[in-house]
Image (cartoon, rainbow, N blue to C red):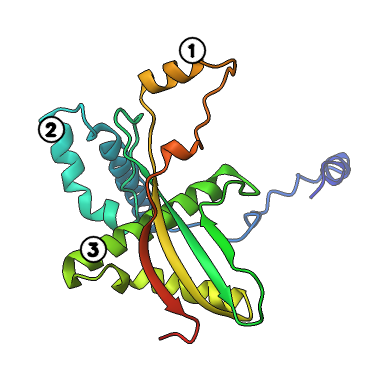
Amino acid sequence: MSRRSWAVRGSRGEPPDSSPREPVGGPGWSPWACRSAGLLIALHLSALISGVLGVEPSSPLERALAGWFGPYHALVDLGYSYRFYTEPPPTPVAEATLRFRDGRPDETFRLPARAVAGPLMRHQRQLALAHALYVDAREAKDQTGSIDQGRLARSYAGRLCRLNPGCVGVTWRVTQHLIPNRDQVREVLDSSSTARFDLFDDSLFSTPEWIGDFPCDGS
């Protein structure tokens, strides 16, 4: 009841309406559901904190806690580095050459692309896709002796075939984007008039490694 209605009832000598009102938005959570949700949130936050503290340099206790949450990190894909890289490894860059049957020139698809529209997380996701393809190909080589038996390279090639009608085959290659050391950067900056170091210079990329040729018929 509105404040005005209360005033009118009071002026007539009637008490204000004190009848119980239903909560807005329907009934809330039961106590056991609230406690269960709170416990799950606390466990998730504990897993996040243990992942942060367990990265070197860390104490044996911090590493033990991170190891205890290891299965959960793998389940929800939380196995990332939470601290600054001290010795970053090379970054795999995957390139696909698309061949066409109608005389069109070959096209090159790069993963990650040099320019990715949208938020920076999209570029990070493409980096993760390229890294997964490279790791899968290396594991296939270790297990079967042939690097072109990786399931991800075949799956990625099939996706490119579907997105590009007329494509008859896809060739995957992977190159490593190397991390320049400080002396290399200092030498380039001191010997040239430029004020920036070109992180995409050809000298920072390794020789492309063949991953496999995949026809678009799915074989």
Frontmost residue, 6 versus 181: 181
Question: Within 10 Å of the Cα at label 1, are there few (<14), some (14-19), or many (20+) other Cα atoms?
Answer: few
- Helix, strand or loop at disc 3? helix
Q: Which three-letter amino acid code belongs to the residue tagged 2?
A: Leu
Q: Which residue is mark 3?
A: 139
Q: Element under label 1?
A: helix
Q: Residues within 10 Å of mark 2 (few under 14, many from 20)?
A: few
For image coordinates 40% across by 86% down, the residue present is 219
Query: As rendered, which of 13 and 155 lies closer to the eye?
Result: 155
Q: Residue pushed farthest top?
A: 190
- The earlier-in-sequence mark between 2 and 1 is 2
Specify the farthest residue to the left. Answer: 60
Say few, some or many: other residues with alpha carbon within 10 Å of mark 3 (under 14 / 14 to 19 / 20 or more).
some
Kind of residue at disc 3: Glu
Task: Give the percent coordinates (x, y) of residue 190.
Answer: 49, 12
Residue 25 in the image, given as x and y percentages of width and height: 64, 57
For the residues marked 1 and 3, what is the alpha-carbon distance in whole angstroms?
A: 42 Å
| Near-viewer residue (109 or 105) | 105
Q: What kind of element bears circle 2? A: helix
- The label nearer to you, 2 versus 1, is 1
Q: Using residue 46 as the reference point, say whether residue 218 is left or right of it.
A: right
Q: Are marks 2 and 1 in contact (CB under 8 Å)?
A: no
Question: At which x and y percent is residue 105?
Answer: 64, 69
Q: Mark 1 highlights which residue?
A: 190
Q: Which residue type does callout 1 highlight?
A: Asp
Q: Specify whether residue 32 is in view.
A: no
Do the residues under discs 2 and 3 have CB atoms within 8 angstroms?
no
Say left or right for 45 vs 171: left
Residue 143, by quadrant, is bottom left
Q: Quadrant of residue 130?
A: bottom left
Sequence-wise, the earlier of marks 1 and 3 is 3
Write the residue at 43% across / 16% down. 186
